[in-house]
């Protein structure tokens, strides 16, 4: 496995000290006769800059973009501190399971710096003073766990992919979708200071497919990316004069994040796409929940698309504070809990855990409202180990 150099000017010890006063974590409810004995966390990386210097095509931005303290696409220094808060929060939430000392845990990340560094910072706060190896492939490799559409084993045909995406559009297709989203296009144009002609609305949304993946062009593709860029600027603690060039409020950013969620509703959540794209990662989740030799705590750090694919495959829906429904925030996680009774039977509880935009921006600890218990019927009453694994793989 490869390894990235430490990129932050803030040491891990300082990060953990900063996150120590976490406040009350949510209490994992223990129904009479049931004990929590396995936790599997599938998490998005923390706050990063855009993955490229130009977050919109040349000429659309009204002024230079804000500067960041790391390279494009890397976990920011502020993002590290927000991730450390999440590790401390989860440590308090699962203290009875983690116990004292340095329990064995399994931590895997995608190959990007932002995913590897997120995992390193998170486990350092989850288990302070312990040495935990984060497994990941080399920087030049593609990991099919987190990049499923680069592996031919998971691909749908272009026709199947496009049919799945079109099936979730409103009647009238992309034209109707663009019409429904007209208020968001108008707001983006105000932030972009487009006074003489529309910038976003003049670019109709189009769909195409290749290699099992949906490609969004036009308004929705641009608007979804732009809304996330505004959210990342805000979450990183940048002055409001730099967030959307001083023309975007937090409430407006939350409203625009509906575009980011809509991107995934079309490109990742349609059932056929979601099942194909999440199969390998959900297979690892199933193993971590059901295999006798698996540790009590497992971590998988990937991307917003991974959470959306799993959400679509398992029919899971969430809404983090100050985010749109089903939008996967930086550091957001789907958490799978295995509960065991004296007879060796199991229950499965699924939760979504995320910071609000303001908690990321201000580096304030989260409270119980950071966690939602998601409706999920399979294995909710009880099942054996085989049923536990099947619950997260066969839908």
Image (cartoon, grey):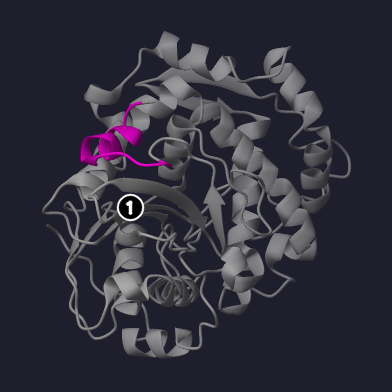
Displayed quadrant of residue 251: bottom right
Count neighbours of disc 1 (C-alpha within 10 A) and say few if under 14, some if 14 to 19, many if 20 or more.
Answer: many
Give whichever of 291, 320 is nearer the camera. Answer: 291
Q: Identify residue for label 1.
A: 338
Reply yes or no: does residue 383 show up in magenta. Answer: yes
Q: Note whether residue 60 is visible.
A: no
**Quadrant including the N terminus:** bottom left
**Residue 108 location (% of width, % of height):** 24, 56
**Residue 346 location (% of width, % of height):** 31, 47
Reply yes or no: does residue 333 show up in magenta. Answer: no
> Which residue occupies 31% across, 65% down?
119
Displayed quadrant of residue 93: bottom left
Q: What element carries label 1?
A: strand
**Quadrant including the C terminus:** top left
Looking at the picture, does residue 365 appear above or below residue 104?
Answer: below
Looking at the picture, does residue 322 appear above or below residue 379?
Answer: below
Give whichever of 51, 174 is nearer the camera. Answer: 174
> Which residue occupies 79% across, 52% down?
191
**Residue 40 location (% of width, % of height):** 32, 54
> Which residue occupies 36% across, 78% down?
8
Looking at the picture, does residue 369 appear above or below residue 219?
Answer: below
Q: In this view, does 98 lie to the left or right of 198?
A: left
Displayed quadrant of residue 280: top left
Q: In this view, does 34 lie to the left or right of 131?
A: right
Give whichever of 192, 176 is nearer the camera. Answer: 176
Give the magenta-colored segment's residue range. 380-394
**Residue 231 location (% of width, % of height):** 63, 58
Q: How many marks?
A: 1
Q: Note whether residue 16 is visible.
A: yes
């Amino acid at each position: 496995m490869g390894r990235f150099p430490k990129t932050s000017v803030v040491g891990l010890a300082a990060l953990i000290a900063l996150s120590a006063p976490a406040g009350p974590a949510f209490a994992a409810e223990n129904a009479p006769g049931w004990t929590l004995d396995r936790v599997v966390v599938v998490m998005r990386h923390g706050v990063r800059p855009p993955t490229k210097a130009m977050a919109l095509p040349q000429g659309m931005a009204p002024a230079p973009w804000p500067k960041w303290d790391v390279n494009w696409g890397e976990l920011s220094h502020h993002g590290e501190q927000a991730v450390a808060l999440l590790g401390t929060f989860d440590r308090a939430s699962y203290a009875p399971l983690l116990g004292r000392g340095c329990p064995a845990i399994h931590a895997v990340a995608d190959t990007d710096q932002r995913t590897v560094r997120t995992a390193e910072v998170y486990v350092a706060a989850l288990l302070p003073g312990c040495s935990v190896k984060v497994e990941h492939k080399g920087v030049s490799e593609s990991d099919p766990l987190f990049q499923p559409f680069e592996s031919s084993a998971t691909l749908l045909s272009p026709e199947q992919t496009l049919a799945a995406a079109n099936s979730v559009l409103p009647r009238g297709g992309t034209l109707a979708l663009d019409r429904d989203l007209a208020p968001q296009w108008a707001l983006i144009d105000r932030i972009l200071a487009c006074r003489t002609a529309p910038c976003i609305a003049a670019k109709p949304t189009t769909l195409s497919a290749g290699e099992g993946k949906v490609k969004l062009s036009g308004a929705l593709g641009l608007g979804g990316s732009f809304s996330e860029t505004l959210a990342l600027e805000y979450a990183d603690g940048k002055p409001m004069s730099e967030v959307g060039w001083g023309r975007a409020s937090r409430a407006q950013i939350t409203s625009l994040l509906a575009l980011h969620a809509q991107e995934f509703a079309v490109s990742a959540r349609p059932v056929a796409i979601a099942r194909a794209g999440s199969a390998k990662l959900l297979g690892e989740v199933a193993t971590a929940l059901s295999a006798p030799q698996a540790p009590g705590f497992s971590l998988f750090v990937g991307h917003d698309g991974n959470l959306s694919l799993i959400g679509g495959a398992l029919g899971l829906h969430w809404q983090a504070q100050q985010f749109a429904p089903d939008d996967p925030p930086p550091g957001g996680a789907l958490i799978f809990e295995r509960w065991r009774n004296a007879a060796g039977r199991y229950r499965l509880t699924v939760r979504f855990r995320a910071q609000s935009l303001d908690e990321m921006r201000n580096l304030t600890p989260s409270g119980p409202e950071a966690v939602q218990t998601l409706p999920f019927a399979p294995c909710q009453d009880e099942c054996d180990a085989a049923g536990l694994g099947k619950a997260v793989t066969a839908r």
